[in-house]
Image (spheres, rainbow, N blue to C red):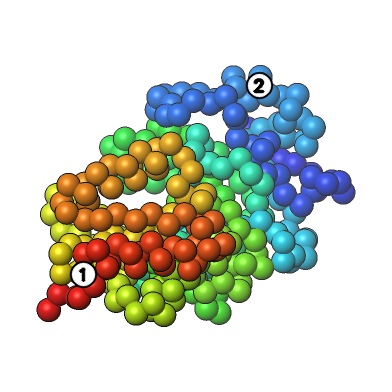
Amino acid sequence: MSYGVKNRRNKHSNFLGFDEFILSKVEVPPPPKTNHSHILQNYRTVLGRVGWDGDTVKISTHVNKQKNDTVLVGVLRNRRDRDILFGQRWYRMPLVWAPRRKFQYLAFYQPAAFGREGKRIEYYGRVVRCSKAKRIKLLPDEPAHPRAGWDYVTVYVGDVRKLDRPVRNVVPRRISFGFTTLERLLKSRDILELYGVVHAERLVAVGLRRAGIRAVPQYRLKGKRRYCLDFAVFCKKGDVAIECDNKKAHAGSLQRKKDRAKDAYLKKNGWTVIRLPEDDVISDLEGCISRVRNAVWKLSARRRA
């Protein structure tokens, strides 16, 4: 049995977001046999305030497009997922991992697996309804999948629209669920603009060029650890690794731990590591470039042949 939400004329009629849909007490990850019906019953009083009493949420589509509408960026893992989106107009995500924030649009990131069409967002659509189903029901041809018995949120969209200009992942960043606005989605040229991230690396690139320091952007190390450096400067007596640390991306304890491991590996292999915090780049770019210049001078600024 399924139930719906009538299109009431109140603040909830435009969209029922995941604040009401996702259950905050569900642990990650759940056993495949987990049944969330009893948890839904426990949250009846909370969900009831917006008319929820079942497994399906219907959303009014009679809403004018607003620039500040919230957009959830999801990842299309492969071409099959894109074919499902085009043909059946739905996108899936595990219930326990689904964002809880309200959103009115979905945008779809295509990773490197898409080849020439990868590392970009090209398509988006307005959300029209959400439902809950087992993964095995959505993808019956994958009965052996480790999450076959998990509950998934299925988000249905209206027309799938193509952006006039794709949003590219120019400076490669790992993409997972993220939020932006419709205005930014339609105007942005790259992922950093989309999320309102200051282009610290671009500022540093300009500063290095003006200082006459020849740096290689996005230099990938070869060996046991395939790290990518924001900039690498090769000198006669050693190499300099320059890392531009975005304030938000490097704030978590896990990321700081990864940064320390990366620095230790670089130093062990003869690199001089310079980390430039985003706030310093914005407020004192010249001071940041001076740090690099001093390190380069000490190592002899002549580039390798």
Residue 24 versus residue 155 in the image, above or below: above
Residue found 86% across the figure and 46% down from its top:
10
> Label 1, on which residue?
300
Looking at the rendered structure, which numbered label has been put on residue 41? 2
- Residue in front for this viewpoint, 202 or 27: 202
Query: Residue 68: x and y, percent?
Result: 72, 61
Q: Position of residue 191 (x, y in %)?
A: 49, 65
**Residue drawn where x is 40% and y is 32% of the image:** 149
Tag of residue 211: none
- Helix, strand or loop at disc 2? helix
Q: Residues within 10 Å of mark 2 (few under 14, many from 20)?
A: few
From what the image shows, is residue 74 above or below residue 304?
above
Residue 110: x %, y % from top left: 41, 63
In the image, taking residue 13 as reference, residue 252 lies left or right, namely left
Report the side of 211 relative to 152 (left or right): left
Q: Residues within 10 Å of mark 1 (few under 14, many from 20)?
A: some
Nearest the camera: 96 or 273? 273
Total marks in image:
2
Q: Earlier in the sequence, mark 2 or mark 1?
A: 2
Amino acid type for the residue under numbered disc 2: Gln
Circle 1 sits in a helix, a strand or a loop, which is it? Answer: loop
Which corner quadrant of the image does residue 83 belong to? bottom left
Residue at image coords 15%, 64%: 237
